[in-house]
Image (cartoon, rainbow, N blue to C red):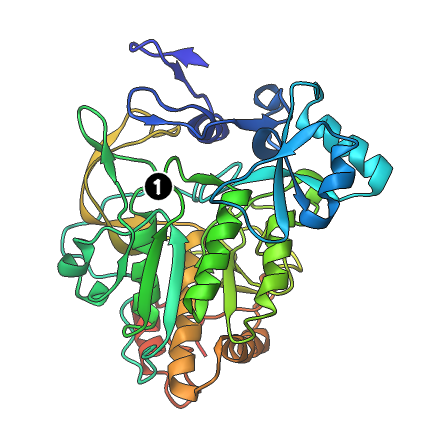
Amino acid sequence: MSIGDDGYARPQTTLEAQINLILHGIPGVEEGLEGAAAYPPDWREKGSVDYLYRERSILVRDADVERLRTIVPSEPVRGEDNLRGLTLLQFTADEQRSVEEVCAAVDRELGEGVVTPDHIFYVCTGTTCPATEPEPVPPGSPPFPGVSTEACDGSGVRVAVLDSGWLDYAATQHPWLAGVHGQPDHAIAGSPARILPYAGHGTFVAGVVRTMAPKAEVEVRRTFRKVGAQYESHLVKQFAEELRAGADLISLDFGSNTRSDIASLGFDVVGEQLANYPGVALVAAAGNDSSRRPFWPAAFGWTVGVGALSSNWRTRAYFSNHGPWVDVYAPGQDLVNAYAQGEYWYTEPPNLGRKAPFDGLCLWSGTSFSTPIVSGLIAARMSATGENAPQAAGALLARARGQAVPGVGPVLLPGQACDDRQQGSHHDQCHQRPACYCR
């Protein structure tokens, strides 16, 4: 890494920039995630990261706590993040092994997956984040994809977005966001003031949901309080709270790779709780690593895992994860929607050091944004058919498989929420993009 005039190291790669942001934050502006670490320790030299995690901590099912403590000197962490069925164990001073060494030892003695790291989940993935940094668009630009004019508009459907929070001025600035609400996104910090990385992400996602389902009730929770990252143990508690709060659809625009690709233990416990809410569906981003490696929670069979189409809507986006665990692909490159107001300082090569003003809109790419297209289409269908979320999702996935694109897989496009007799707005979108995949 080179050293800048301010004395701080300058990342040479996008990976360095993204991992440094999570581990260390932006000096003098925003702190990193406390206790965060990357495996392997020499990830910088290797040029790749296997997983991110909390130091000196592991996750275990409640039923396994006592037998684990005979193997691993540790104490349960008690606090507001506790989720029934899942315990966070913190190493005592007697445990000198690393998290990886402890997990490997337990794998040998008790079997894989009995314990896992407390993984870090992020809207930034291990190599691309989301897939691009936001780019300015002219003030007054329309959203893209545009606001649906279909009769099925999402009325009566509640969509919960777990993300960076909500910029409330967006509801007055952009008519398609009227009525959206949520926990505040603290988007500006530093001196001079700047838009923080990933600030506005939740507002952008809410805007995409609303273009597909203009009358859906959308709530944005502030899940990621800094640097676009949070620990698994914290996230699953928030997810469980949304289940109890009565959401029909939960849109998750984040995820993580895991140690040895073992399923996320926290979300495995959440999946068991989801069985008590048979009318709720989870839609999750497939990630932006251009990889077949499972990305959790999208890789669970009980989620709708969403990959991204490129800007021509006929091919897979270069950044999108893929593989048999991805259920559907939707547009996710060069989307336009609501964003923060202020000046953004780019943190990644090749734009490192560049600054750009934003006036509440941006162009952005990533599976984080193809995900709310699918969430919005499910909500729109629900309002037309009376189906619950899993039923509506199943019907749309069947349609997606019926129009699968060779070399990509099942595809859903804007305007395809209702039946084939109501495709006006989809054809409008196709006129905007003459090369797009139309049926």
The front one of 49 and 23 is 23
x and y, in percent, of residue 190 in the image: 23, 26
Left or right relative to 115: residue 197? left
Residue visible at 62% across and 21% down in the picture:
41
Left or right relative to 5: residue 271? right
Residue 206 in which image quadrant? bottom left
**Residue carrying label 1:** 198
x and y, in percent, of residue 92 in the image: 65, 23
Q: In this picture, is 14 found above or below 379?
A: above
Given the current orientation, which residue lies at the most extreme bottom position? 421
- Tell me the element at label 1: loop
x and y, in percent, of residue 19 in the image: 49, 29
**Residue 71 appearing in the image:** yes
Left or right relative to 72: residue 322? left
Residue 278 in which image quadrant? bottom right
Number of marks = 1
Q: In this picture, is 141 found above or below 24?
A: below
The front one of 266 and 24 is 266
Residue visible at 62% across and 48% down in the picture:
86
x and y, in percent, of residue 103 in the image: 73, 33
Disc 1 packing (10 Å; few <14; some 14–19; many ≥20): many
Q: In this picture, is 126 found above or below 337?
A: above
Left or right relative to 350: residue 319? right
Q: In this picture, is 33 found above or below 203?
A: above
Q: Amino acid at mark 1?
A: Tyr
Residue visible at 50% across and 63% down in the picture:
283
Residue 191 in which image quadrant? top left
Q: Quadrant of the C terminus?
A: bottom left
**Residue 318 appearing in the image:** no
Residue visible at 58% across and 70% down in the picture:
276
